[in-house]
Structures are given as structure tokens and as C-alpha cells.
Amino acid sequence: MNKLILNYVTENYEEILNDWIESTKEGADDRVLRVISDNVFLATSREYLDMIISNIKGVKEEYSNRLIDFAEKIIRLGWPLHFVTEGLSSFGRIVFEGMQEKGIVTPENQLEIIYEFDSWMRPLNNELVNTYSRTWERTVSLQKIALQELSAPLIPVFEGITVMPLVGTIDTERAKQIMENLLNGVVKHRSEVVLIDITGVPVVDTMVAHHIIQAAEAVRLVGAKCMLCGIRPEIAQTIVNLGIDLNKFTTKNTLKKGIEAALEMTSRKLVKMEGAN
């Protein structure tokens, strides 16, 4: 890095930071600014600038560590990639124009300094993009795993009775997760009756019904009974129109009725206590 650039950045740090924050805020997406406070924005911007300066100084190990930490932080804050790359371009422009105003950049050395800027900013931009992308992919993968674990929970509600509440769209991948959780949960909780609650499933088509039937059959094969709850009128009509046979297991229109039926199937029932409202 050209020493003129390094010296200018070091000596005019606060001025560059203020100009950079003002410029960045003007071009920032409103969604970015709404989700973070001014203090967080200022602290993150200062961290970004410090990271860039550590790269200018050639402190590679310090810069690499800062870059990874910074990428993880801005992804958590919801900063898009273009916000980061445009921030780097803005930084270069502010520094170059500032050096021009102070007479550091002259007609004689202008081409040399432009070349220095380009040879420094291009690999830095590529490294920023690559690190951000890798961190984003890793974060998304971890979130996907966490969502899969939560997407089809099997919840024990009484001894021998478990409930699997399903919410959202059921695709092939999620259907496999449902099947796996059902079979493992039935054995783990020693379930006699399993209630699959589809109240939160917006659409039941042929594929969804097929997956549910497969799940019910799998539960039956491991020695438990399966009940389908949350059959809304529109879903019942869709099932009839599709010609889907759900006669192999019990259906109820609400989870409450399903639990009551499950208690009866296990020789129990809900009893209202005297004096209870």
C-alpha cells in the first residue's frame, strides 16, 4: 500500500469515519437502518473501518480474524452484501477525494495512486464477498438444521399419548423429517396413540395426503394408533374431491376432540372436578 494513502487514513481517521457514515446512511436501505440503533450502526461502522485500516497496514492475521468476526456480526444484523461492498467503494472515494483536497494527490502522482487504490481494493472486495458468502452459507445451513428439528416435533401430552402439530407447507424433504421424528418419538415415548394435528397446514393436496397416510402406516407398523386432527371443512372437501381414502385411521376436526378420543382409546377420560368453573 502506498505510504501516502496509509498516512492520510491514519491521520484523518475520525473525519473519514464521519464522512463515511454520513455517505453510507444516505445510500442505505431503510430496512437496514430500521432494525439497528444509531449506536449499533456507529459501532459497527467503526469496526468496519478499523478492519479496512488493518488491511491497509498489512496486518494480515489481525485483518483475517476481524473479517470473519465482522461477517458473522453483519449477517446477524441483517446487512445485505451490497451494503458492505458499496461501503468499501464509498471509503475509497472519500479517501481519494480527501487526498485531492489536501493536495496529496497531484497530476504527477495521480495515476500511481489510482493504481495503488485499485490493486488494494479489488482483492479486498473479493475477499469481503467470499467471506460474507461462506459465513452466510454456514449460517443458513445451521438455521436450516435448527428449523428441521423444530418443524415436526413429537410432544408427549399424556402417558402413552403424543401430539405432532404441523404448521406450514409440507414438501418431500419435510415429510421425511416427519416420518423420522414420528417413528423415533413413538418408540422413545412408548406412545399408544399419536395425534397428527394439521390445523396449521394451509393446503392438503394429493402429495400432502399421501405423506400423511405413509406416516400413519409407519406408526401402525411400530404398534401405535394414529389419529388425524384439524380437519377443516375445506380440507375435508378437498380430500373427498381427490378421492383420498382416510378410513384406515380416526379423524377429528379439532385437537381437543382428538385428545379426548385418545384418552378413551387408552381407557381414560377427562373428568370435571366439583367446584371447578
Image: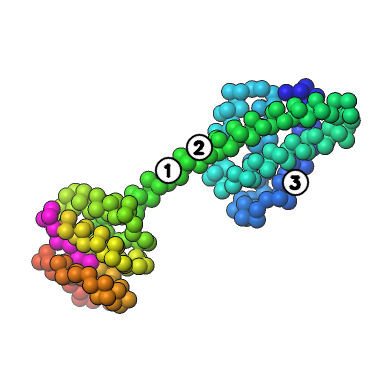
Query: Distance between the Cα atoms at labels 3 and 2?
Result: 27 Å
Q: Earlier in the sequence, mark 2 or mark 1?
A: 2
Residue 218 belongs to the span the image colors magenta = no
Read off the residue under disc 1.
141
Is 227 in front, or is 247? 247
Q: Amino acid at mark 1?
A: Ser
Image coordinates for residue 236, horizontal then vertical, percent: 27, 75
Q: Amino acid at mark 3?
A: Ser
Read off the residue under disc 3.
23
> Can I make out residue 69 in this image?
no
Image coordinates for residue 59, horizontal then vertical, percent: 64, 22
Q: Residue at x 34, y 65 (%)?
A: 201
Q: Earlier in the sequence, mark 1 or mark 3?
A: 3
Q: Residue at x 18, y 62 (%)?
A: 226
Q: Earlier in the sequence, mark 3 or mark 2?
A: 3
Is 241 on the left-hand or right-hand side of 248?
right
In the rendered view of the protein, which quadrant contains the N terminus?
top right
Q: Which residues are magenta?
A: 220-228
Instruction: Look at the picture and state if 196 lies above or below 173.
Output: below
Helix, strand or loop under label 1: helix
Q: Amino acid at mark 2?
A: Arg
The reply to whether the C-beta atoms of the residues labelled 3 and 2 are less than 8 Å apart is no
Read off the residue under disc 2.
134
Q: Would you call the spot at circle 3 few (<14 residues within 10 Å), some (14-19), or many (20 or more)?
A: some
Helix, strand or loop under label 2: helix
Q: Would you call the spot at circle 1 few (<14 residues within 10 Å), some (14-19), or many (20 or more)?
A: few
The quadrant holding residue 257 is bottom left
In the rendered view of the protein, which quadrant contains the C terminus?
bottom left
